Amino acid sequence: MLLVNHLSIVYQTTQVLNKFDLSLATGDIFALTGDSGSGKSSALRFIAGLDEVQSGQVVLDGNQLSNNGVHNIAPELRKIGMVFQDYALFPHMNVKKNIAFGIHHLSNSEQQARVEELLLMIGLEGIEQKYPHQLSGGEQQRIALARALAPSPKLLLLDEPFSSLDKNHQEQLVLQVRDILKKTNVTSILVTHDKHEATIFADKVGVIENKQLTIN
Amino acid sequence: MNIKTQGVLVLAVLVLAVTSIGTAQAKSEGLVTIYSSRKEHLIKPLFESFTKDTGIKVMYLTGKGGALIERLKLEGKNTKADMFMTVDAGNLWYAATQGLFQAVQTQTLESNIPSHLRDPKGLWTGLSVRARTIVYSTERVNPADLSTYENLADAKWANRLCLRTSKKIYTKSLVASMIYHHGKNKAGDIISGWVNNLAATPNAKDSHVMNAIVSGQCDVGLVNTYYFARLIAKRPNVPLRLFWANQDTTGVHVNVSGAGVTKYAPNAKGAIKLLEWLSSAKAQAIYASLNKEYPANQNIAEDEVVSSWGSFKQDKMNLTQAGVLQADAVKLMQTKDYR
Amino acid sequence: MSVLALSVAMPIFVVALSWLFPERELWAHFSTVLLPNLISATAVLLTGVGLGVTLLGTILAYLVVMVEFPGRRWLEWALFLPFAIPAYVLAFVYLGVFDYSGYVQVWMREVLGLPGFDIRTRSWAVILTFVLVFYPYVYMMVRASFKRQKINIIEASQLLGASPLRVFFNISLPMARPAVAAGLLVTLMETLADFGVVSLFNFDTFTTAIYSAWGDFRSIEVAAQLASLLVLAAFFLIYFEKKARGQAKYYSTDVSNKKPYHALGIVGWLISLFVFGVFMLSFAMPMLQLIIWGWTSISEEWSAKYVDLIVSTSVLTVSAALITISIATILALPSCCKKNNLWLKGVISMATLGYALPGSIMAVGLLYGINQISAISVYFGAQSINHIIFGSIALLLFAYVSRFMAIGYSSIKASAEQIKPMFTQSAHLLGASRLRLIWQVYLPMMMPGILAGSLLIAVDVMKELPATYLLRPFGWDTLAVQVYELSAEGLFERAAVPALIMVLFGAVLMLIFQLLDKKSSKNL
């Protein structure tokens, strides 16, 4: 269960988002759209605990993560996963090490099992030893997803993860990712500027217009 | 413990480990420690011979004169150095004025080294004499035209003269002697004359001056004689010869290399012993043959090559003057654009 | 962290404090007689050397990275080699070969009948010498930057009809600007601090005045005051470098070995000839001369002493490089400096200014600093630490760290800046502690910079003379000291022996670096 209350964002002196409220049940897939500069990415980064904002509260499964725009709990302790626009795969680590990065506290065999399980789920078995630069954009994107899912986060944030993929495969991949998220039953928020993508991906779609969030 | 503390600890251990190697040197009565601005290859054979004769070990650290003086000053009472050895009376004089030496007057030193090569209070002792004189091309110069340092300022040498840079202490001491003999004004005129006669930018080394004369860039120059000795050892037929300058006037400009016992010497006794040994016939003979300098001990014969150049009249200016007038000499050269 | 940076910057502070002891009379002499000429000569030198290394270093880097031509593969590495030769050694070789009495002019006069000339009267000879000695700095940094330029950007501009020259000036060069600026900065600071080359050419620069104040007028205070002006100049250079870089961030992690241009036929061979010519002039020719000299004197010069020299040089080189690079890494970590911590930033930039100080001034500054600390501790009843610190290897290492921090720091900073914030953020979101973030993300990603920095520092420490000469403990003579002692006496033939060993040493370091570099940058 995720609750976001009274989230307001001010860029320098311009208010871009005013009193954003959102509540998601476990397993919900939510998509947030809006024009560029509408503050949707900032909202996401605030929920992740990366940036601080004017005001706002984040409660995840009863734990208050942030309050009054300030973070009570550091990003690494929030159990929130994130997939970045250009994936942020560590270039010096192979696929296996990338995916296992968030679960290093597990034993080697457990890590191996989890990596294999995730690779099977995203349909990329047997590429453990490859390095990010040897993979296509779509493959990198799915590895980034697997890496974010590996520690079983309570919440997954996706920041424009499909925008740099070619159009032909995009829709197919959007649906594939949706399936994976549904299977793992993780609460997710997708930020995208593409309304169509948002509609086919999410259970609920929110649009930021005139500093206000409207949920359809 | 975070990474930074770890890093700092690792570093600290490393530094300590290496430091202990550096300082783990046994203190020994039979050890004399020397700071020297004479180069290693010129002093090592002397010290080895001394150790063989006396059983006293010698430890030395070479460096530039000015820098070693600074180091000695800062080390003060804590210095490990028993002796400071350097070239040029100016450096010795300056070290003496900074209170770095203790007076040493022994009979051996007094009988071995003539008084004008020693500090009047015994703060330092000259150990070898070097003469700076004219070198000329036998192909293009009639030695009858040569006479004095001052004469090289004459317009007849226009575009024919090569000199070593004014930054070298040998040049500074020579110009100091010009100021001593002629006063600042006349010395300034002589320097201007030299600068006008230069055929090339002043050279960094005496050996470059001689190369320039051999190759025809210029016809006359000024060098310390042992550089000439080195050149003829390699090229016996080189068309260059030395000319003893100022024989009818002030005499050839000479300088010394020498040493003094440091004020806070941990082993002053050993250092005095070494100083006396260095003035002895045996050591002076090594000085003479090793670097083809003139022995300070007048009882010792010169090296064969050196004596073949004939004897000459020395400038008897007291050598402390080279130190006293050094700053004036440099100012004068800088003003007259002698680089 | 502040303490770390502060202690590295200590010699700088000592030098600045010298202004408490003004000496009017000497300043009057200096400012009327010496300084006007020296400042303009220094400006000419810096301008010439700056233009020269920028042109040569950038063009060479561009050719080896972007163009395929005959012999490219080995020339790419061979161009690093001149870096292993100390500048003053190159200078005496060049003078021996090219001055009036050198082979080249003798041949020109005797065979071609041309008049001889004094190459030291004009500034171009000394400028050219510096350019040939220091171009590897720019080459090294710009090459790395070109390698990371996305090949598709260049292909895109090719498809848009841009000529190779236009691609170079409009795309590659602007993208490599921070690297050019960094290389240029190091070169200019080295040139400012140099004493060996300029004294061989008898070319008076600002450093000449510093040594004159100290050596001739026995005023270490005025020397330090003049030196502090050098530091100020370096400060402005750094400032302008930062300004030039502006707000732009040049993130890129791609390394491509594909060459966008293939120079075939005559053009390829001309390019080969040019690059090979630079290699010949800056390395092969001086080496040949050193080998000839060394050959004639090896029996006279070689002795068991060389084992000691090699051991001391190795120990100093390796430990100084390790310590400096560790501190530089800590200071350059992306997490080290919060954007708003101006104090720490300031102290770090102070710590990197030591590079512009002539080595012996820095060394004396260090001695003074230690002496003052000691005096203060004695005042408070503690024991003097002078006798422990003076003449200990720790002090020498300290001097190296202070002097070469700039190289380590700038080289690591360059690779640290390529770590995009999203890597940090995603590592955080995956639950990584700070320690893990540093060990597993930052350090591996900074490794190319760390390696390049270590190599540069190691080679520089190996070549370093003035601080080593003044501060080394008994029995710690290095190869550089031996080269100096022999060449100061005009014994160039004998000096060639230790010089050759140094070059060999440097070449081995370079080889190790090459292997590690290939390994570490494979996946970055």
Image (tube, helix red, strand yellow):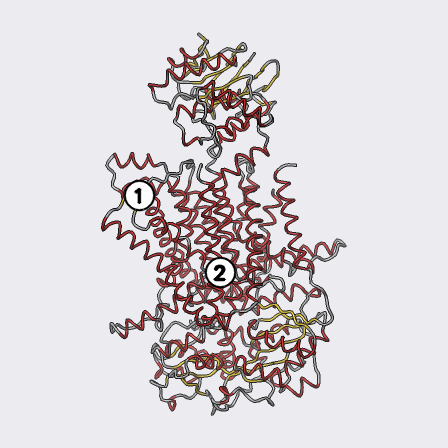
Give the mark nearest the N terminus, 1 or 2: 1
Kindly report which numbered mark, 1 or 2, lies closer to the viewer in this rendering: 2
- Pick whichever, A13 or C5, lies toward us: C5
Pointer 2 local density, CA inside 10 Å: few below 14, some 14–19, many at least 20? many
Q: Which residue is mark 1?
A: C168
Query: In this view of the protein, which residue sits in the foreground, C30 or C489?
Result: C489
The CA span between labels 1 and 2 is: 36 Å
Q: Position of residue B16 (x, y in %)?
A: 67, 52
Kind of residue at badge 2: Met
- Judged left or right of residue B33, residue C418 is left
Q: Is residue A19 among the parts visible in the rendering?
A: no
Asked if labels 2 and 1 touch by Cβ distance under 8 angstroms, the answer is: no
Q: Position of residue C205 (x, y in %)?
A: 44, 62
Q: Is C245 placed above or below C500 here?
A: above
Position of residue C147 relative to residue C70, above or below, is above
| Residue at 69% in and 58% down | C388
Is residue B133 rendered to the left or right of residue C328?
Answer: left
| Position in image of residue C273 (x %, y %) | 29, 55
- Position of the N terminus of chain B, as image quadrant, is top right
Residue C359: image tag:
none
Mark count? 2
Q: Position of residue C226 (x, y in %)?
A: 51, 59
Residue placed under numbered mark 2 in the picture: C502
Q: Residues within 10 Å of mark 1 (few under 14, many from 20)?
A: some
Task: State which quadrant residue B211 falls in.
Answer: bottom left
Q: State the SS at label 1.
A: helix
**Do badges 1 and 2 share one subunit?**
yes
Q: Amino acid at mark 1?
A: Phe
**Element assignment for label 2:** helix
Q: Residue furthest top?
A: A216
